[in-house]
Amino acid sequence: MLPILIISTGLVVLIAMWRAYRITRDAMAPMVVIGPLLLYLYAYTPLTFWREGSLGSLFPDALERLEHVQWLILIFVSALCMGCLNGVRAMAGRDISRLDIGRQLTAKTRSVILRLAWFFAVVAFGVFIYKVELRGGFVHVFSRPKPYLGASSGYISELPMLAYPAMILAAIAMQGRRIDMTVVVTLLVMAWPQLMMATLGGRRGPAFLVLCTLAACFFIIRKKKPDIRTVFGGIGVVGLVLVFLATNRHELYIGSDLDVDTDEWIHEATQRSANIGNEYVYGGSLILTADYAERYYWGKRLGVLLFVRPIPRQIWPTKYEDLGVDWMEAEPGTGGYSMNEWQGAVGFVPLSGSAGGFVADAYIELWWFGAILCYFIGRVYSYVWRRASLEGGFWLFVYVILLALSVYLVAQSVGAWLYRALLICVPTWVMWRWAVEPLRRRRQLHVLGPEESLAFEQTPPDAGPSSNPPRVQPR
């Protein structure tokens, strides 16, 4: 029964990908981009484990209960796919092959956007250098595998992630330019803090994010979306890079002999064996442990993440302890369950820092009602994609960020995805509204007049072909 459920999960994802692309012909539709990640983690990986028999050796007393886990995966993944497919019918027949920055962006507006991009880049670069110096300097930090960079404040520690909005905003400002050395150097300089963590740091998350963001910037500047072969080829290349980092990060540091093990790299990419650190194994184990303990969080963790985590520790030093979720900081890999509960459920304890993907995370948060959360996440992707395709502007920025962060959703957790999305998008939205929107608004008022401008902005983005806003020439 288990292989049938695994294959069914893969078929659901494939059908959703086919439907999304057949209707829209958009290689950047949510299902087209997220689908390969779902296939790899929830279909290819468990099928390989089952064929090699490594699941039986790892779960000698719980193998039959993995059918329950795969049923859960099938339902939750189907819910996410349904959410991503919402609204694709309304996009049928529309020409959304171009990545446009939006209406009425003048040279002055582009200049403001580029200055905003450099502001984010300078902040990211400065904080990165500060964190490196705090740990002993560049050579000291990057002379060991997978270095850790922290700071006294969580806000300061996460500021280097502003390199991502810097790159995308710069690409929006430079859209339509020929991609020359100046453009390439600008993007690479802005990406430098994350490039260091992805290469010498051996970090898979920054590697995926920075590669996807740079690729998106290339197509934004060209004003044209990639075709389906480019998207699938790019995802395949990025996947190989991530596997390379996972298997050879112990050789990626200053002074290393760079004794890269290509055999282990190829084996990990094609013929994987189950281990307790694998995302599928950990996610399934977390589900079984939650059932064994009969304890779920019913939104408490997400509430802490959204409303308590942003409160500085200087104001509330015991915030996690007071709410009974101190494990979120001390032992995040346990999911809040004790070692005895893990041993009783699956016979082993998780590795520190393990992650199991959005299915397990949604399940321990909301039990079977987590499927509703998965559907809602898919709806978010679908909504932002439609707005980005029809309006561009800031919606394009948000959609590129969500696509780049999809690896955190699939391979880590809903919380990891949501936290980073808010961290990147909220300050960028604030600065965009403060610096860019007034210029766009004044331009629309000048060209259209107050009443026409209001009607122009209130046109619904997916009300059908007849509601497309007209192209209005300046008077």
Image (cartoon, rainbow, N blue to C red):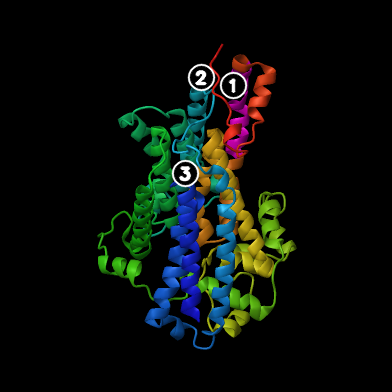
Mark 2 or mark 1, which is nearer the start of the sequence?
A: 2
Question: Disc 2 marks which amino acid?
Answer: Lys
Query: How far from the left and from the top, in percent, is residue 176?
Result: 40, 28
Q: What residue sits right under mark 1 in the picture? A: 439
Which element is circle 3 on?
helix
Query: How far from the left and from the top, in percent, is residue 22?
Result: 46, 51
At 44% across and 76% down in the image, what residue appears? 275
Mark 1 vs 2: CB contact within 8 A: yes
Mark 3 or mark 1, which is nearer the start of the sequence?
A: 3
Q: What residue sits right under mark 3 in the picture? A: 128
Occupied quadrant, residue 369:
bottom right
Between 260 and 431, the residue placed more toward the observer is 431
Mark 1 and mark 2: span between their CA atoms?
8 Å
Question: Disc 1 marks which amino acid?
Answer: Leu
Q: Which residues are magenta?
A: 427-445
Q: Which mark is residue 108?
A: 2
Mark 2 and mark 3: span between their CA atoms?
30 Å
Question: Disc 3 marks which amino acid?
Answer: Phe
